[in-house]
Amino acid sequence: MVNITSLFYRVFLFLMILSLTVFISLRVNKYPRNLRLLMMLAAVFSAIGTLGRLVDVLVLFIHIPFSNEIHVITHIISIGGLIWIFISMMKTLESYYIPLTSIGTSEEKRKPPGTAYLVLSSEITQEIAKLMRNLKGPVLIFTRHPHLYNKSNNVKIVWITTADSKGVSPTALHVLQDIAIRFTSENNGTTVIIDCLEYLIIYNGFRGVFKFLVSLKDYLMIKGATLILFVDPMTLKESEVALLRREFHHS
C-alpha cells in the first residue's frame, strides 16, 4: 500500500518543479540576448529535475528499472545546473551595475579626472539623478531630455534634437565634438555627460558613434576632463556592449 505522506510529498515536489519549468520556458524570449541562453539552459535543467521527480512518483506504483540511479543523476544535474545558472546570471547582472559612488560621492572617493566611464543601466533617469547630486565643477550634458537636469551656472545643457533650431542635430557629431572641446578648453575639471547614446546610434550607426566617442574620450583625457556615458544595454547588441566595455571604464 502506498504511503499517503510519501505520495503527497513527491507529488508536491513534482508539481512545484514542473511549474518552475513551465514558468521559465514561457519567459525565455522576454530576456535580452545575453541572458536568453542562460534562461534556456535553466529550463532544460529544471525539466531534468521534473523528470526525476516524476520517476519518484511513479516508482510508488510501478517498477522502474534503475530508479535509484535516475533519482540521483537527475537531481545532481538539475540542482548543479540551476546553481551554475544562478551564479552566471548574478555575474552578468553585476557587470551591468556601476556603483556611481565610484564616480563621485565625495572628493576623497572620486577617481582622478581624465577618465571615461560607462554606466550600463536600464534605469538611466534614476542613475543620472544620483550622479548629479554628487558632481562638482563644470558639467556639459548632451541629452534628449533637458528637463531632467537643473540649470545652474556651472551646467551647460545641449539638447540633441531634429525638431528645434535651438538644439543640435544627432547627425552633427562633429558639432557635438566641437562643443565639448571648446567647453573643456574654457573650463578646468569638466565632466561631459552623454545620456542619449541610443539616439545617436539610430542616426549614425554604431560604428560612426563609436569612432566619435573614442576620439572625444582621447581629447578629454588629455585635458584632464571626465566623460560619462549612460546607455541601456538592452538596446545594443552584445558585440556593441563588449566594444564599449573594452574602451571605457565600467567598474
Image: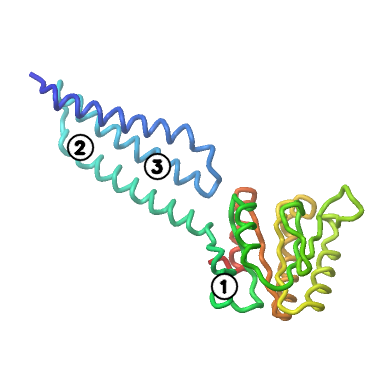
Look at mark 3 in the image and give the residue it sits on. 42
Measured from the top left, where is residue 197 in percent x and y?
71, 56
Give the quarter of the image for residue 130: bottom right
Residue at the extreme right of the image, as rendered: 165
User: Is disc 3 surrounded by few (<14), some (14 to 19) or many (20+) residues within 10 Å?
Assistant: many
Q: Which residue lies furthest to the top in this view?
A: 1
Which residue, given by chain and number where applicable, does mark 1 sit on? Answer: 106
Describe the element under mark 2 as helix, strand or loop: helix
Query: Quadrant location of residue 8?
Result: top left
Residue 151: percent from the left, percent from the top?
77, 60
Foreground mark, 3 or 1? 1
Cα distance in 3D space between marks 2 and 3: 19 Å
Q: Nearer the viewer, residue 38 or 5?
A: 5
Which disc, if any, is residue 71?
2
What amino acid is labelled 2 in the image?
A: His
Q: What type is the residue that disc 3 sits on?
A: Ala
Work out whether mark 2 precedes mark 1 in sequence or the reverse, and give the earlier one.
2
